[in-house]
Amino acid sequence: MRVLVTGAAGFVGSHLVPALAARGATPLATDREELDTTDPEALDAALARERPDAVVHLAAVSSVAAAAREPALAFRVNFLGARALLAAVARRAPRARVLLIGSGECYGALPTGAPPASESAPLRPGSPYAHTKAAADLLGAAWAARGLDVVRVRAFNHTGPGQSDAFVLAGFARQLVEIELHVSEPVLSTGNLESTRDFLDVRDVVEAYARLLDSRAPAAAYNVASGIGVRVGELLERLMRQMGVRAELRVEPARWRPADRSVGDARRLREATGWAPRIPLEQTLASVAEDWRRRLSAS
């Protein structure tokens, strides 16, 4: 299988490309310097040249905070880019399966006591990032109704080696390693620690994506989630305990968001593909900490 991966040099792409190769696929990796996914002509040329059997569309403004700072850019990349890609696939590779990578953020905050969100839950985006991803998801559904083989993926929070410190657990790990290396005072900047999140290891996430490339999985919307919510403050405490580093916690206004709850139900994915998360959270936290030790020791 020839798989065109947009945004391949990003966090998830750097894990997905080797995972696809290990499964015997031929990943055709592109990044923004090579392919502007908002440019219809460039997309047409790339699809005509590469003749992919499948496309995994990762290219995005993937940070909630970055999208809030530049909503017009997020709209252009996340929605208009998805629109241009789907139209180009319809013209140049109409039999290709498209994995349109979205987000569990599309469901918005779950009420207290509500069960994990299933794919039938209404989309209630609450941020510029979530709005752009929800709009792209709905557009993917419209193309699927016209016969394009579109799988809409709603991935909940994931982390692992290589993630930017703009994301919560990687940001905590970087600060703790800086304290550990005595390059920073033992003070850790946080946002709201009362939010609840459904966290996965990125390596489990790319396994889900790889399985969804199999045409035996029906073209539909799929959550990629553990179904288990953990308070962000508890995740930080577990990370500090595992690393053996303590710090004074200081809330930084720029990082603060109202507390909310985001947990997904992935039964549809499990029934269609047999997927289940396999990497324990403690192993994920250890790999994130070790990744930052390597990065900061080398700098």
Image (tube, rainbow, N blue to C red):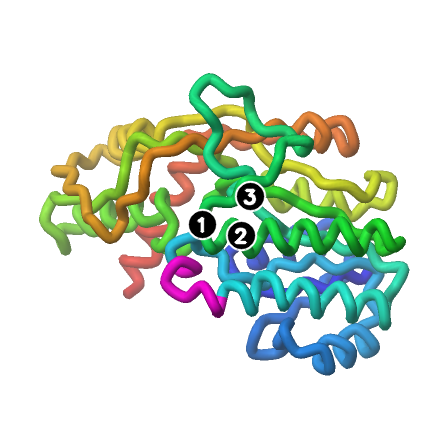
Location of mark 3 (residue): 106
Where residue 285 appears, as percent x and y from the top left, is: 39, 37
Question: Tags 1 and 2 in contact by the CB under 8 Å rule?
Answer: yes
Please tell me which residue is depicted at 82% across the width and 39% down the height of the picture. 217
State yes or no: residue 71 in magenta: yes
What residue appears at the point 62 percent right and 42 percent down from the top-left corner? 154
> Which segment is the magenta one?
66-73
Figure label count: 3
Looking at the rendered structure, the secondary structure element under dot 1 is loop
Q: Which residue is labeled 2 in the image?
A: 131
Residue type, mark 1 in image: Ser
How far, Cα to Cα, is label 1 from label 2?
Answer: 6 Å
- Front-lying residue, 70 or 35: 70
- x then y, percent, for residue 267: 69, 26
Q: Amino acid at mark 2?
A: His
- Label 1 belongs to which residue? 127
Residue 266 is covered by the magenta coloring:
no
Q: Could you say where residue 30 lies in the image, as x and y percent from the top left?
A: 64, 70
